[in-house]
Image (spheres, rainbow, N blue to C red):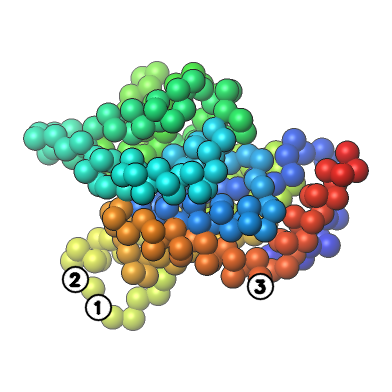
Amino acid sequence: MKSFKELLKPSAPQKFKHKIGICLSGGGALGFAHIGVLQALEDHRIFPETVSGSSIGSIIGAMYCAGYTPSQMLQFIKEGKLYKITKIMQFQPAFWKAGLSNHSTILSLVNEFIPNNSFEKLDKPMHVCVSNLNSGKWEIISKSEKLDIWIAASCSIPGIFNSIKINNNVYVDGGLLNNVPAQPLRETCEYVIGSDVIPHLTTEKSLQSRDVLVKSIRVAQHQSSQAGRKLCDFLIEPKAIKKFNEFSFDAYQAIYQYGYRAATKFIGENPDLLKLANYNEKQNQIN
């Protein structure tokens, strides 16, 4: 990780659109830690101006870009609008043909909280990562009048949700090929903060078959995140994954606290990030 002085020293003349951007990883219910990270950053007067996200990171990121505060998002979860798996997933009888769940709840959720349903009409720029099964590559979507469709595509966990067909391409979870999509932020922001809720954890004991599958998927996701992680100037890793899993939606409060504590601890151990907040305030006063 670069020192603050190195961050402030430009390698080449370049004018960025934004001072600070934040990338929110995928991770199912573990993504509720992102809300805690955002709250901790704001408590330290660090306000990201643009967001990039995969899967659950795209939902939380879009709501943040629509103007909702972290405390408001937490309240929505307490009201039962985000946390129960039965709310997020509408199961279908023929799940072996089309996946365990359709996207009706995610679509209605986005339309309820972001009725304009447009990337361009958000308060802050939002970048949604999706995986294109036709090309075998990840894509970043930043402009569209169908925000809900692209978020649903980004959340389409293979084998759990149906895929989504858009313009003759088949899309699934952005986290499949890029779980920390920091690339669009690196192009437009001076400083990039990453929040990755699927950090790599070592395993010292043998695993049962189901645990092997889960661990293998997480390792694959972590590998798909390497390029994006390296692009982050500051990388926060909430470790709710030690106690909870991607479907622990009922543990939203505890997972949120993991994010808040991880970000608070990170800021305390990396005063350069706090200096960045002070530096940003001074720049705003000058401008």
Mark 3: amino acid: Glu
Q: In the image shown, does 97 or 256 lie closer to the viewer?
A: 256
Residue 222 seen: no
Question: Do the residues under discs 2 and 3 have CB atoms within 8 angstroms?
Answer: no
- Residue drawn where x is 75% and y is 55% of the image: 277
The picture quadrant where one finds residue 134 is top left
Q: Residues within 10 Å of mark 2 (few under 14, many from 20)?
A: few
Q: In the image shown, does 133 or 142 lie closer to the viewer?
A: 142
Residue 76 seen: yes
- Residue drawn where x is 44% and y is 30% of the image: 113
From this viewpoint, which residue is outermost toward the right? 286
Residue 209 as seen in the image, left or right of residue 267:
left
Residue 240 x %, y %: 40, 65
Q: Provide the secondary structure element on which disc 3 rests.
A: helix
Q: Is residue 245 above or below residue 181?
A: below
Residue 8 x %, y %: 83, 55
- Residue drawn where x is 79% and y is 50% of the image: 280
Question: For residue 208, which numbered disc appears in the image?
Answer: 2
